[in-house]
Amino acid sequence: MDLHPDKVSNHEMGTIFEELIRKFSEQSNEEAREHFTPRDVVKLMTRLIFIENGVHLQDPNLIIKIYDPACGTGGMLTSCENFIREFNTRADVVLYGQEVNQEIYAIYKADMLIKGEKSENIKGPSSTLSDDQLPDDRFDFMISNPPYGRKWEQDKEVVQKEAEKGFEGRFAAGLPRINDGQLLFLEHMLSKMKDGDERSRIAVITNGSPLFTGDAGSGESNIRRWIIEEDYLEAIIGLPDQLFYNTGIRTYIWVLTNQKPAERVGKIQLVDATSRYVKMRKSLGNKRHQLSDKDIEDILDLYCRFDENDVIKVFDNEDFGIH
């Protein structure tokens, strides 16, 4: 195979490099898999975040900022960029991310350099929760798979001080228990939404803990209540189990925005997509199920229909009260 620069462009070489990263992550040990979200899940999240923006993405003068606060090797950011390019090859797509793991951070920076893309907006290696290296930036789209059940004890002092700032900081809504920082990442992302009439959208994947942990009056409950009262939460989609390499548990995609479509204002849609999968012929770690292209289209159709049936429920914000 001739890989001379005259034969292979920077972008093509970057694609080859990304494929090697994917293969390594799929077949390597559990620690490596932790930093890689399966391609089928990334594809679904990408489609969800851009689902109502097809016309907008064709703007010839489009400048779009996309952010992942736990970016790993950049798979989600790359997926978003590639999706936009399908609509608009002239768009100025600017990717931003932060990664705590030194080796993973170096891999993603190398990938960006190989493709000839700007890497200065990929920050790290440091914790997003206690060392936000993009403090003044706001983003059009955010997408992430923050770590599940990861203690934030090392971030505690900085996070608590920032929470004391109220809404001048990132964590005014509340602090979850110390053994799981997923809701902190969600608060952080919400603080990065644009102001005024500018729209931001978020797709973030979590396990069940941010949804169900914490009684009324707890930090988790207060965060959920604030999200609902501010009318940020558009939909939650329950996914099948055994989709990830490093865990077999069920996961959930949260779709959030600061500007809901008129028919969704004051509403929250719950979609049960737990049966939408195909079994893999050969498992990869804990991953035994996969979202086929048809499954992804079916889930998107359920989301777009916004009517109630046996797998879709639509609630008024008030129905969730203090939770």
Image (tube, rainbow, N blue to C red):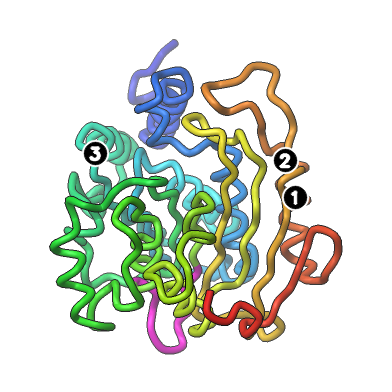
Q: Magenta-highlighted stretch: main secondary structure?
A: loop
- Where is residue 277? Give x, y as percent: 73, 37
Contact, mark 3 vs mark 2 (Cβ under 8 Å): no
Amino acid type, mark 3: Asn
Q: Quadrant of residue 234?
A: bottom right
Point out the frontmost of discs 1 and 3.
3
* Real-space CA distance between mark 1 and mark 3, rounded to the nearest whole angstrom: 34 Å
Crowding around mark 1 (Cα neighbors within 10 Å: few <14, some 14 to 19, many 20+) is: some
Q: Quadrant of residue 7?
A: top left
- Where is residue 298? Give x, y as percent: 78, 51
**Circle 1 sits on which residue?**
297
**Circle 3 sits on which residue?**
101
Amino acid type, mark 1: Glu
Point out the frontmost of discs 3 and 2.
3
**Circle 2 sits on which residue?**
293
In the foreground, 94 or 130: 130
Q: Does residue 262 show up magenta in the picture?
A: no
Q: Is residue 8 visible?
A: no
Query: Residue visible at 49% across and 57% down?
Result: 204
**Above or below: residue 138 compared with residue 281:** below
Q: Left or right? Give the position of 96 relative to 54.
A: left
**Above or below: residue 181 compared with residue 314:** above
- For marks 1 and 3, the one nearer the N-term is 3
What's drawn in magenta, residue-wise? 192-201
Q: Is residue 112 visible?
A: yes
Query: Residue visible at 53% across and 60% down?
Result: 212
Quadrant position of the N terminus in the picture: top left
